[in-house]
Amino acid sequence: LWVGTYTAGVVRLRPGGRMETYGPARGLPGNDVRVISQDRTGTVWVGTRSSLARFTGQGFAQVQDQGAPREGVSAILEGRDGAVWFGTPGQGLVSYRDGVFKAFTRKDGLVSNWVMALYEDAAGSLWIGTNGDGMNRLRDGRLTAIRPINGLWDGSAQVIIEDRLGHLWMTCN
């Protein structure tokens, strides 16, 4: 079990109840953890307020690959196709597939570069919640904007979930 904290980095609960703490001394880029996710290959990704890191087996290493998020990570989601998606507070949306990072920003059709929530629905669409300008749907490589003018309650979508009937629910301001 991995637990992220706002002030003490990452805590890992090992079998038998032993706890290990990971902070900057063990490679974490900062103690302010925003999100943790493990992908199907077993890689543990940690988004902090300042950067993205992955677990090496002994500690964490800041991800410095070309195109990787550099200014913090606020959401992580692994899609059914194996792509790992990162929402950032300023650099937009970043995908990681086959060892390559690719960014999507306002220039590509995102409503905002401040991505707060990610969700993949039953049909395979990626829903992208932003802070203040609405949300997007990414389907078949095409971004569609959904804003308050289109019926969205508020311009901010912080959590997105789907019920058993296929209806999406989200938290807004």
Image (cartoon, rainbow, N blue to C red):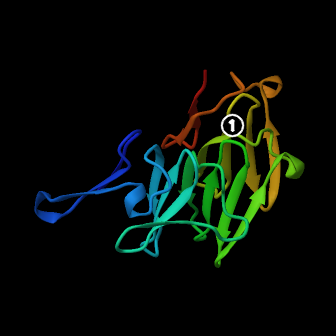
Q: Residue furthest right?
A: 107
Q: Would you name the residue on which mark 1 appears? A: 130
Q: Residue at x 58, y 62 (%)?
A: 79
Does residue 155 appear left or right of residue 165 in this picture?
Answer: right
Taking 141 as reference, is 107 above or below it?
above
Does residue 152 appear left or right of residue 14 in this picture?
Answer: right
Q: Residue furthest left?
A: 16
Near-viewer residue (139 or 54): 54
Does residue 155 appear left or right of residue 49 in this picture?
Answer: right
Q: Residue at x 15, y 59 (%)?
A: 18
Q: Looking at the picture, how far across and down is residue 74, in whole percent? A: 57, 45
Q: Residue at x 41, y 39 (%)?
A: 6
Q: Looking at the picture, how far across and down is residue 147, in whole percent? A: 79, 30
Assign the C terminus to one quadrant of the image.
top right
Amino acid type at circle 1 is Thr
Near-viewer residue (148 or 52): 52
Taking 104 as reference, is 147 above or below it?
above
Near-viewer residue (72 or 138): 72
Res 76 quadrant in image = bottom right
The residue tagged with tag 1: helix, strand or loop? strand
Q: Residue at x 66, y 55 (%)?
A: 70
